[in-house]
Amino acid sequence: MSDTISQDEFFMQRAIELAGRAEAEGEVPVGAVAVLHGEVIGEGWNRSIGQHDATAHAEIMALRQAGQVLANYRLLDVVLYVTLEPCPMCAAAMVHSRIGRVVYGAPDPKTGAAGSVMNLLSYTGVNHHVAFQGGMLEAACRQQLQAFFKRRRDEKKALKQAARQAAQLGNDSEQ
């Protein structure tokens, strides 16, 4: 069991690194790693903004790469590590690709589809159920996301304040 936990932590740390790449590109920092028998076969990070593609989530990017590596969309026995609980789109892709297991870091109370809002990974009406585990390196995953959104809010606040100051200077010069 300790080997599984250390392997899970190792690959989740890699997902956190990939989330950093997303953040560096101005994307929401989510990273994902697809692993088969201890080997990475796919990696992804959020790229929806840069690629102008609503489906370019970290999980989808990793699943696409894994499918290319295996030359098959069926990803039996693959474990997907992702820093944020999958959304409904990503969870459905996991079911459709028939991955074996997903391990995620932080829960997503707004769109989580692995139990937070809904559970599509083991929904009784689908033909494949994906085992899942949440909370792997949760604090680090959550902190990365919270820091990103705090920085974004602070930047918006600074822009609004600068706009108000510019408008005030314009009004002062007119008088």
Image (cartoon, grey):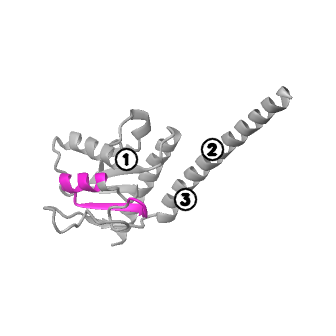
Q: Which residue is mark 1?
A: 58
Residue 118 in percent (x, y) is at 31, 66
Q: What separation in Å lies between label 2 and label 3 (alpha carbons)?
A: 20 Å
Q: Which residue is mark 3?
A: 143
Q: Nearer the viewer, residue 118 or 94?
A: 118
Q: Amino acid at mark 3?
A: Gln
Which residue lies most toward the right here? 175
Which residue lies most toward the left here? 127
Q: Which mark is residue 156?
A: 2
Q: Nearer the viewer, residue 143 or 109?
A: 109
First in sequence, mark 3 or 1: give its number.
Answer: 1
Q: Is residue 122 magenta?
A: no
Mark 3: secondary structure = helix
Quadrant of the image containing the C terminus:
top right
Position of residue 63 relative to residue 5, above or below, is above
Residue 2 in percent (x, y) is at 37, 71
First in sequence, mark 2 or 3: give its number.
Answer: 3
Q: Answer few, some or many: residues within 10 Å of disc 1's Cα (few below 14, many 20 plus, some between 14 and 19).
A: many
